[in-house]
Amino acid sequence: MMRKQRVLLIGSGGREHALAEAIARSETIIYSVMKSRNPGIARLSKEYLLGDETDPNYIAEWKLIKFRREPIDIAFIGPEAPLANGVSDKLEEMGIPVVGPSKKAAMIESSKEFMRDLMKKNHIEGYVEHFVFTDKRELEAFIEEYEKPFVVKPVGLTGGKGVKVMGEHFKTKEEGLEYAKEVIDKKIGGFDRVIIEEKMVGEEFTLQAFTDGYDIKPMPLVQDFKRAYEGDLGPNTGGMGSYSCENHLLPFISYHHYAKAVKILEDILAAMRREGIIYKGVIYGQFMHTADGPKVIEINCRFGDPEAINVLPILQTDILEIGWAIVEKKLSSLKIEFENTATVVKYVVPEGYGTNPLKGEEIKINEKEVAKANFLLMI
């Protein structure tokens, strides 16, 4: 009788809980590393470590890994920060295969400048013109002359909360300029650099895909909602909820435009290969469906949160089988299937979520009643 596979899961959010549920459907033993205790993941884990999930050396020193007490067969990394910090590289140095890109490949998300430059250099469809500034006087002169509505983006990671859009988060050029200066002064996202992009008009959608760096297997499309408060009147958050449709498209996306979005992701992976970077894991394109077709808002190096919670519960193919196909570069031979079922995710959040959330207060949810109503609870 074959032993159960030992899986390391890194991350502590709802996305990682959905991933843990998918992994638990296989013959596995889960060990997890979390920055804070997620009770759903904890229940599914044989053992877990609470601490800095973004620190490669901290994770490598865990006795479970350091002394190979119960050797890990394969690892899944959920959030972007551990990937950007090189956790994938460290684990692979230790002989643990990882479903997740290297630090260099994760630059597709950790540096918006790298992503835009890559698209521009390779003439990839869906590119949006971008301008990068470190000098505030040059920034002022540009904004003064720029006549189009624009978006202000920190170059680095901000947990989905750093981007501000004219007409939504600020009303005037002057307000946008002040925030752009703040990004430079405070190094929001980790860099004293800011990106200005033309504002796109349309409907946002998410396309996630499994990839081994060569082949790509797309997942059902999802539309998520980032802004707090009814009527999308509040600040950007990490996500308030999302939905997917039974046919795996969206009401405003035709198969033609879906195929275009898939081609954009394929072209980005090919461009990275030309740079000597083999990307493996999950790649996630945030797109704007415009009058001219799909345009890239950003490319992320992992599952979306909350979008993972839409697609993983309806995944019919064994996630471990997918993981091994990714690390062994055999994804092209695998057929990946999802149920033809619509999904909805709705967040329960503390007061002030997105800007200054209430801390230390318990949020109580009647899990038994949720289960009776046939809802899937992700924590």
Image: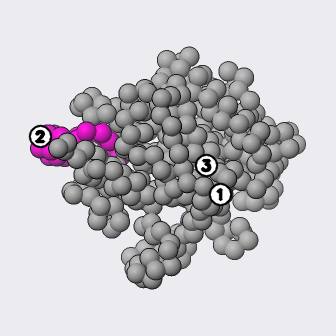
Q: Earlier in the sequence, mark 2 or mark 3?
A: 2
Q: Earlier in the sequence, mark 2 or mark 1?
A: 2
The percent position of residue 109, horizontal first and vertical second, equals 54, 39
Q: Is residue 349 visible?
A: no
Look at the numbered discs 1 and 3 and tell me whether their residues touch, using CB distance below 8 Å.
no
In three-dimensional space, the C-alpha distance between marks 2 and 3, rounded to whole angstroms, equals: 40 Å
Amino acid type for the residue under numbered disc 3: Pro
Read off the residue under disc 1.
246
- Location of residue 236 by image quarter: bottom right
Of residues 72 and 130, which is closer to you in this image?
Answer: 72
Of residues 100 and 183, which is closer to you in this image?
Answer: 100
In three-dimensional space, the C-alpha distance between marks 1 and 3, rounded to whole angstroms, equals: 9 Å
The quarter of the image holding the N terminus is top left
The quarter of the image holding the C terminus is bottom left
Vertically, is 259 above or below 152? above
| Numbered tag placed on residue 282 in the rendering | none
The percent position of residue 142, horizontal first and vertical second, equals 79, 37
* Residue stretch rendered in magenta on the structure: 54-75
Read off the residue under disc 3.
220
Read off the residue under disc 2.
67
